[in-house]
């Protein structure tokens, strides 16, 4: 399978879950992959690096830190002048119980915002040159939780506000780069069996591998469309989400 020969991708949040599954998927599709996760040791990426010699560059990345993102971007730029695809997947959930009538931990709300919303903008900013020299494509893993039009939750302040902000940041990037053939795609992966809630979410609909396959299918489907606003859809059903 060599359809992506010589293509390069960067994925964030690759310790486990959807991010790790995306790395596997991209490697099998022939991409050279830059994978940033916060764990220093990761047996899975070590194993993949052996299985795909020279194709996986795994590094420690905290998308919440200016310095870490700059170091990661310098590392990537030392290896390649062009990126075909950046997938901003890293996120944290934070509290999902406290309503406006409870004690909200605002330090945590800001931590969630810094990682889940600003992280993707930080990465896009640090890598914009190789992106625009390459595939001009940024995919931000958003959520239905970021839709204001479809909002129904009474809690989840940090996460929902951060995903709505991620959507706005994506629109601002898209407004600029689409004039030069660039685009941002916003994908909701569906409900995924991952550790995002702290424990394994066995009740969820999709395995990370299934979610990654849906994400890659939608990227293929929409990558050449340059609309006025970013495409914002459910990766499983293809249905458009309300902003
Ligand atoms: N699970 C769902 O049902 C669902 C629904 C809608 C949207 N999403 C979105 O899908 C994406 C993937 O989520 P997931 O379900 O695969 O959950 P996950 O396993 O928790 O994935 C998030 C990844 O981001 C990493 N991460 C956390 N903070 C980071 C930081 N500061 N810098 C770099 N990486 C960091 C996590 O590392 P550690 O695991 O080591 O902390 C983890 O590998 C997220 O954007 C999430 O918001 C998920």
Image (cartoon, rainbow, N blue to C red):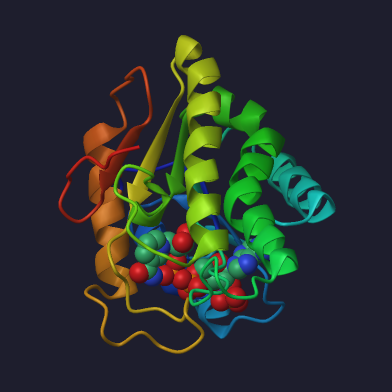
| Residue in the picture at 80% in, 49% down | 66
Q: Position of residue 241 (x, y in %)?
A: 26, 42
Residue 60 showing in the rendered view: no
Name, please, the residue furthest toward the right. Answer: 67
Name, please, the residue furthest toward the front. Answer: 101
Q: Is residue 55 left or right of residue 79?
A: left
Q: Nearer the viewer, residue 32 or 161?
A: 161
Q: Position of residue 18 (x, y in %)?
A: 41, 67
Residue 140 showing in the rendered view: yes
As displayed, is residue 93 above or below residue 148?
A: below
Q: Nearer the viewer, residue 74 or 29?
A: 74
Q: Position of residue 84 (x, y in %)?
A: 48, 36
Report which quarter residue 224 is drawn in: top left
Report which quarter residue 152 is drawn in: bottom left
| Residue in the picture at 21% in, 37% down | 221
| Residue in the picture at 48% in, 10% down | 179
Name, please, the residue furthest toward the top. Answer: 179
**Where the C terminus falls, by quadrant?**
top left
């Amino acid at each position: 399978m060599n359809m992506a020969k010589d293509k390069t991708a960067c994925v964030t949040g690759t310790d486990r879950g959807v991010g790790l599954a995306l790395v596997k998927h991209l490697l099998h599709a022939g991409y050279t992959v830059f994978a940033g996760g916060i764990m220093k040791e990761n047996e899975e990426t070590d194993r993949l690096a052996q299985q795909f010699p020279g194709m996986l560059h795994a590094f420690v990345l905290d998308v919440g830190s200016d310095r870490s993102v700059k170091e990661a971007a310098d590392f990537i730029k030392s290896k390649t002048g062009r990126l075909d695809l950046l997938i901003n997947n890293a996120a944290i959930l934070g509290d999902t119980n406290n309503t406006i009538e409870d004690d909200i931990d605002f330090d945590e709300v800001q931590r969630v915002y810094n990682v889940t919303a600003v992280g993707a903008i930080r990465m896009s900013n640090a890598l914009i040159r190789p992106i625009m020299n390459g595939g001009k494509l940024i995919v931000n893993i958003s959520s239905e939780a970021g839709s204001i039009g479809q909002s129904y939750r009474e809690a989840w302040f940090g996460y929902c506000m951060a995903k709505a902000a991620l959507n706005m940041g994506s629109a601002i990037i898209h407004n600029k780069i689409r004039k030069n053939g660039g685009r941002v795609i916003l994908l909701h992966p569906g409900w995924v069996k991952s550790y995002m809630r702290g424990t394994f979410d066995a009740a969820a609909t999709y395995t990370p591998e299934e979610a990654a396959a849906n994400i890659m299918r939608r990227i293929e489907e929409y990558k050449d469309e340059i609309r006025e606003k970013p495409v914002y859809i459910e990766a499983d059903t293809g249905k458009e989400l309300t902003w």
